[in-house]
Image (cartoon, helix red, strand yellow):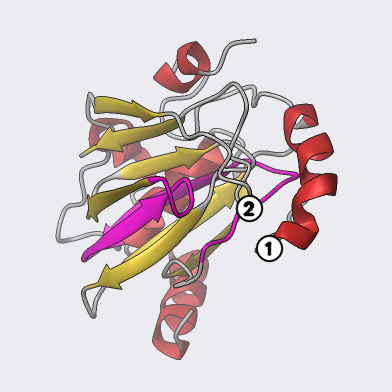
Amino acid sequence: MSALDSIRKAAEKMTGIGRPGDRLPSLLCPPSITTFRFDDDGVIPNHPRWPLVLYRNGVALPDDLDPAAVFEDAFESNGWGQSWRNGIYDYAHYHSRIHEVLGVARGHAQVRFGGGRGQTVALAAGDVAILPAGTGHQCLSASEDFLVVGAYPPSGTFDICTSSRDRERALATIPEVVRPQADPVYGDHGPLLKAWTD
């Protein structure tokens, strides 16, 4: 997170300026939903059962609000916390012990999901990608203003896996990460819960 974003985030928390407050429900748009399933490529395991879920234009980002704050508040209101503001790493990586949500607050990027044999997806402001544990992701290119808000469900432990050395442990831990109780954007009845079934 840049120094300016850190200052902005601290000021928002203290004053509420730029945060959506009671407007939040009206900013959650009916999404266009796409799911992606990725095979294990020998380095990136991906998830054995659950797809990556992408909401195109899932969140409206009015000019009078801080777009990152809109995502932070949406995720937090649905129990997804430990939020951060940044980009997406430019190397392939995944999390073997926790799911992750990525909300695009500004700009656009080309992100490869699923590892070397995965799929490159164009992401833009307002999009939300929900990655089950094990899903590879890597930013291939991005606009200068590209900003993502990430968050995690309450169960699970953050880790970063990048190589075949992580594989044996990851293959055991990925299937054990429990399904979240709520969709990070749409709550208890969100589309994610239908997409991720046992």
Residue displayed at 63% across by 47% down? 42
Q: Mark 2: which amino acid? A: Val
- Taking the magenta stretch, the answer to whether it contains residue 114 is yes
Residue 65 in picture, x, y percent from top left: 25, 59
Residue 163 lies, in percent from the top left, at 68, 63
* Label number found at residue 122: none
Residue 152 spot, x, y in % from top left:
62, 46
Location of residue 114 with respect to 104 vertically, above or below:
above
Q: Hey, which quadrant is residue 112 in on the image?
A: bottom left
Residue, disc 1 = 163
Which of these two is toward me, 26 or 193? 193
Give the side of residue 56 with respect to residue 6, left or right. Answer: left
Which segment did they paint magenta? 92-118
**Residue 43 bears which disc, if any?**
2
For the residue pair 89 and 145, the one nearer the viewer reads as 89
Query: Is residue 27 magenta-colored?
Result: no
**Residue located at (46% from left, 89% from top):** 3
Q: Classify the position of the C terminus by image quarter.
A: top right
Q: Secondary structure at mark 2?
A: loop
Q: Quadrant of residue 143?
A: bottom left
Q: Residue at position x 33%, y 49% from top?
A: 20
Q: What residue type is disc 1 on? A: Ser
Whether residue 175 sits left or right of residue 104 in the image: it is right
Note whether 90 is above or below 30 in the view shown: below
Depth check, front residue: 94 or 128: 94
69 to the left or right of 51 = left
Most extreme residue toward the bottom is 3
